[in-house]
Structure formats: C-alpha cells, structure tokens
Amino acid sequence: MVRVGQDVGGTYGGRSAQERRAERRQRFLAAGLAQFGDRPGYRHASVAGLCEAAGLSTRQFYEEFRNLEEVLARLHLEVNDHKERAVLRALATAAGLPFEQRIAAVLRGYVTAATEDPRRLRIAFVEIVGVSEELERQRLVRRARWVELIVAEADSAVARGELAPREFRIAATAFIGAVNGLLHDWTAGQFDATLDQVLAELTALLLGAVRHPAP
C-alpha cells in the first residue's frame, strides 16, 4: 500500500529514501560534532544521548553506524578534509609565488580552517587520540598526508633553486607535531596571541627547519 505523499519509486514528501537517509546521517554527525567536540566529549558520550541530540531513534542510528567510534572516525576525516580543501585553495592562490610566500599562505589556510570551530579542533587533536588501533592508524595516515605536502613543497623549492637539497621528511614530521600542539594550547587559552602572531611563529619555525642543513 502506498502512503499519502509517497511515490511508488520510494520518494516521500518529495525526497527519495537515499536523500532522507543522507539527511539522517548528517544529523547524527552534527550531533556527534557537538557532543564529541564539546560536552560531554567522546569518552563520556552514549548512543542514547547522541540520538536524543539528533532527534532520531537508536534504530535509525544503527542503520547508519556500527557504534560511536565510527561516528568519531567519520568526523575526524571530515575535519581533515575541511583543512585540506582550505590548504589546496591557498596553494592555488599562491601559484607562482616564492616558497616563503607559498608556505605563509598554506599555514594561514590550515590554521584558519583548523581553529575556526573549536569543536573540530578538539576532535582532530584530542578526542581521536588513543581511542583504538584502527583510529590511531587513521590518525597517522592523515597526519602523513600533511607531512607529504610539506615535503613536496620543499622539494619543489629545491627544483626552483630556493632551497638546498636534503631529506625533509624528519623536519616536516617534527613541524606537524609542533603545529598541532601549538594550536591546541593556543585555542585552550594557554597563552595570548593573535592569529598573525601564531602564523608568524609557525612560518619562521618551518622555514628554519627546512633551511637548516640536515645533520
């Protein structure tokens, strides 16, 4: 029997079953962002609490996700995708500029995207750490992509004659760890600084790392 408002093809209220499911999934992710990125935090969250925040049922939750860890994993990927898009836009804008200016543009794009929503920052740098072996692998894989981006930019600068040739991977890895720690402490209020001050310090730190002769 076809319900009022439902077409034989599966639409209901003008939306397909796929569209309704995508909307539910986004509501769960929005609730996860709010609960994991603020209070109560991932480790104190529950499926029931997430469903209540999303205004959906537990049955609908398990139709979309296996557990809360899968929600956290999806959010972590989305947070990194958001930062990556910002960095790629910055690189496109800085095309043809010297290495120092390209790095400054990349860092501005990354830091702005990373810190514009404190909930995203917490998911990327705090809540994801130590949850499980699977999520740790995901975290390290995504961090490795940022390392590769810095190495690629430095290698390109070598090809243009702007940097001396060397292995940049160790310096890039150390820099990524420093960035994450600095941004976490800055947004947590551990020290007072403007965005421009933070960017200036990070730019100087990275330029010093890649220009310093390898041991």
Image (tube, grey):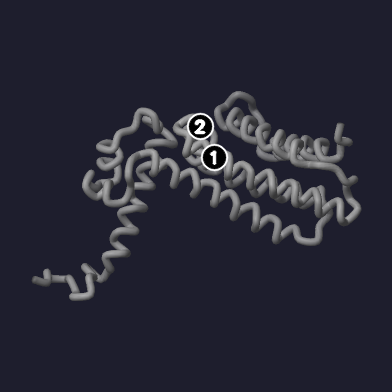
For residue 8, which quarter of the picture? bottom left
Q: Where is residue 103 drawn, in percent x and y?
A: 75, 48
Q: Can you identify the residue that label 2 sits on?
A: 129
Q: Is residue 5 above or below residue 215?
A: below
In what quadrant of the picture does the N terminus appear?
Answer: bottom left
User: Given the image, on which type of amino acid does mark 2 rest?
Assistant: Val
| Point 76% across, 40% down: residue | 203
Q: Is residue 20 above or below residue 202?
A: below
| Point 68% across, 32% down: residue | 178
Q: Say whether residue 92 is left or right of residue 139.
A: right
**Mark earlier in primary sequence (1, 2):** 2
| Point 55% across, 47% down: residue | 80
For residue 9, which quarter of the picture? bottom left
Q: Is mark 1 on a helix, strand or loop?
A: helix
Crowding at dot 1, Cα within 10 Å, few <14 / some 14-19 / many 20+, comes out as: many
Task: Looking at the picture, tell me which residue is in the foreground, 15 or 175.
Answer: 175
Residues at marks 1 and 2, CA–CA distance in whole angstroms: 8 Å
Q: Say whether residue 177 is left or right of residue 80.
A: right
Q: Where is residue 45 drawn, in percent x and y?
A: 34, 32
In what quadrant of the picture does the C terminus appear?
Answer: top right
Q: Say whether residue 178 is left or right of residue 209.
A: left
Q: Residue furthest top?
A: 190
Q: Can you identify the residue that label 1 sits on?
A: 139
User: Given the image, on which type of amino acid does mark 1 rest?
Assistant: Arg
| Point 67% across, 37% down: residue | 176
Q: Say whether residue 190 is left or right of residue 99.
A: left
Q: Which residue lies furthest to the left in this view?
A: 1
Q: Where is residue 200 drawn, in percent x and y?
A: 75, 38
Q: Which mark is residue 176?
A: none
Asked whether disc 1 touches disc 2, contact meaning CB atoms under 8 Å apart, the reply is yes
Q: What element carries label 2?
A: loop
